[in-house]
Image (cartoon, grey):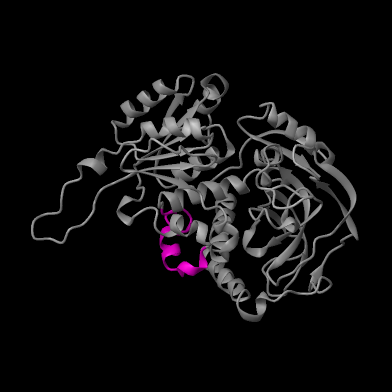
Amino acid sequence: MMAPQANWRDLENELSLLSGEAQTKVQPEAPVATGAVPGSQRALLLRDCKQPYDLITDHHIPELRAKDEVLVQTAAIGLNPIDWKAPDFGFGIPELPYISGRELAGTVVQVADSESRWRIGDRVIAIATDYRDLRKAAFQEYAVAPAFNLVRLPPNLSFEEGATIGVAFVAASLALGVCMGADFSTSLDGPNLFELFRKTSADAFPADIRDECLAAIEGHEKVQPGDWIAVWGGSSTSANLIVQLARLIGLRVILVVDGLKHGLRLSSHATIRPDLLVDSHDPERAVEIIKANTKGKLRFGIDTRGKETATYLLKALSTEDFKTSPPSPPATPPMSAKLRAHLIGLTGLPKSGIPDGSLLHNVPIKVFHELPEVGYALCSWLERLLEQGAISPPDIIDVQEGLESINSGLDRMRRGEISGGKLVVRT
């Protein structure tokens, strides 16, 4: 693995390819390097909502359209709740038929540009947050990935392990680094997203996430080492990565979980044991426990479950520093030093009853694929973290075989049988 400085030189070199003529599309037959790629592939198509995915055996191989793209042969796919919730509830499906799947691990088989750092045979993690581009979807044997959304898989990790971590890592990094303003630079030269975003033109950010990226949290409010954060729904893979990254930067972590299912496992877990573990069985009691143990000073919370639990977590956050912050000293310009409470929702947020001094956040996931410099910053950091063993992939609950097993795997998730880890499909 290259030193951090070399990684950033790679970043600068590859970002230069994205300007001017480098963004023009290339002919499908024009990759400068290619491995053995068949004329067609197997893929899972969603033909309508509330229907199972349909396995077809003669789907076209997705084409490389830009200089910064590579083609990856899928070896393992990580299943996520969105893979069954989207078709069941009819959201996040921009077209039909549709190909789903947000994360995979595999091998590079085509490279569009000779100056890319990727080579045929490289083992990689591909993180497909761009759900509108079906070429990048995981439920197929070959998928396109932008160079800035790829992570080199270290030799000590399997494809199956690689397929567990991508989406959760991106969600955790953005929740902490953007919504809370966390600085990762003290951990293996991680990114300071707060500073990176403010050095980037506002016009570069999609309009629907611009305020979250640039104006949601003020500099004096950023989370600091020693601060408490609470995660409600602490058994999810997103929570797993939130805990690991939070510990790297010196935060104290509260996990709220179903103690009957996950209490013993999490209380003794080598990687994600929290500073405080709270049973969610009685939510009002959980709020009281959190307030008592943080002495009413908790300002940061992340909910991974939904609107109802997010509402409870909001009750546990303190707005006292917002209400009682002292005024500016006499003869000095007026300034606001008030500290708001910040609640980040991964799956839903309350619509009413928001106390003064509280701010609700949605994680701006699309910035990972919309801004190449953000994708590169996170992916190069994840490479270093994995190579150095600074973080570990989430636990694998089970491994199923073949694309044809995905429907049964999603049924297991619907029934709540997959909890506290990841279900992986080996292709």
Q: Is residue 23 left or right of residue 196?
A: right
Magenta-tinted stretch: 183-205
Is residue 112 depicted above or below 129 in this figure? below
Is residue 232 depicted above or below 403 in this figure? above
User: Quick one: 222 or 210, which is closer to the camera?
Assistant: 210
Which quadrant is home to the N terminus?
Answer: bottom right
Asked whether residue 118 appears in the rendered view, the answer is yes
- The rendered magenta stretch, by its main secondary structure, is classed as loop
Is residue 146 depicted above or below 238 in this figure? below
Q: Is residue 132 magenta?
A: no
* Residue extending farthest front: 352
Q: Is residue 369 left or right of residue 245?
A: right
Q: Position of residue 151 (x, y in %)?
A: 64, 56
User: Quick one: 359 or 186, which is closer to the camera?
Assistant: 359
Q: Residue at x 33, y 28 (%)?
A: 291
Q: Position of residue 208 (x, y in %)?
A: 51, 57
* Residue extending farthest left: 330
Which image quarter: residue 130?
bottom right
Q: Position of residue 44 (x, y in %)?
A: 81, 46
Which image quarter: residue 288?
top left
User: Quick one: 332 or 389, which is closer to the camera?
Assistant: 332
Asked whether residue 192 appears in the rendered view, the answer is no
Q: Residue at x 44, y 57 (%)?
A: 211
